[in-house]
Image (tube, rainbow, N blue to C red):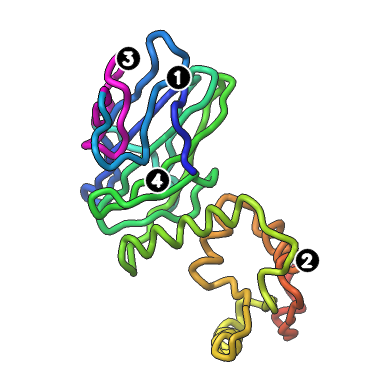
Amino acid sequence: MAPENPTTLIVVDLRLENGELIGEGERITSLSDPRVPTSWYSGALPAGYRPVCNGVVHVKEEGIESSGISGARPPRVGDQYSWREGKPRPGSLMLAIVLPKGWGISHPDPMPREAKNFENRIAINWEFSTDGSDIEFYWSLRGLTREVDDEIERVNSVIRGARGRGSEPEFDVALSYASEDRSYVEQVAAALKAHGVRVFYDRDDDETARAWGVKLDDYLTEVYQKRARYTIIFISASYAKKR
């Protein structure tokens, strides 16, 4: 579940203008108590609280210090955006963002805590323990190809899966292949799935998301050694040349 009562709360509502990501919001700390009373789950406004960014998060109305975030432009490197928080108050930091309408999240680093539907847009939050050192968050945007609630369910399933898996293999088979052979392997994956076989195929949307924020070699090693009962290797001249 998402955190409550962080030491520092940052909430940003994002929009796209001419391909540039721009955000408005608030940075909130407590004046006396070390933590900010925060509600991420409440749909209605709790007594004694006020909305932040139109209510994606609610905070206790008294005893807090707020500074506005206006026209923030998360820097972009390639297809990744970042949010850097310099020297936050030691304790815990919660970052909540509302994605532009029609967009989802891809390859966040670190892994978020939870996604939810906010006014038919996807809202994401992270929590970090911090000793006061700089913290950076990274993510990419992906255009939605499904309903918002379906995408949120998928993202939260990936987040839960990343927190720990049981000892029972998640897949019956994992497919290991060279990218040059993808068109053939994709047909095999589809045929196996049609027969009820649980297949790891790295081009599936869920598996692409599960690789967020991790080294690919480490991720695939975990799949082949722990998450799959068997691995099928598609040996070819291209495969033999791969590292």
Q: Earlier in the sequence, mark 4 or mark 3?
A: 3
Which residue is labeled 3 in the image? Answer: 65
Residue type of the residue flagged with mark 2: Gln
Which residue is labeled 1 in the image? Answer: 35
Q: Earlier in the sequence, mark 1 or mark 3?
A: 1
Residue type of the residue flagged with mark 3: Glu
Where is residue 215? Give x, y as percent: 65, 53
- Give the distance between the C-alpha atoms of the residues marked 2 and 4, in whole angstroms: 31 Å
Q: Front-most of 63 and 207?
A: 63
Label 4 sits on a secondary structure element that is: strand
Label 3 sits on a secondary structure element that is: strand
- Give the distance between the C-alpha atoms of the residues marked 1 and 2, in whole angstroms: 42 Å
Query: Which-is-in-front pick, marks 1 and 2?
Result: 1
Residue type of the residue flagged with mark 4: Ile
Queried whether the magenta region covers residue 53, the answer comes back as yes
Q: Earlier in the sequence, mark 2 or mark 3?
A: 3
Residue type of the residue flagged with mark 1: Arg
Q: Earlier in the sequence, mark 1 or mark 2?
A: 1
Region of the chain picked out in magenta, as a range: 48-70
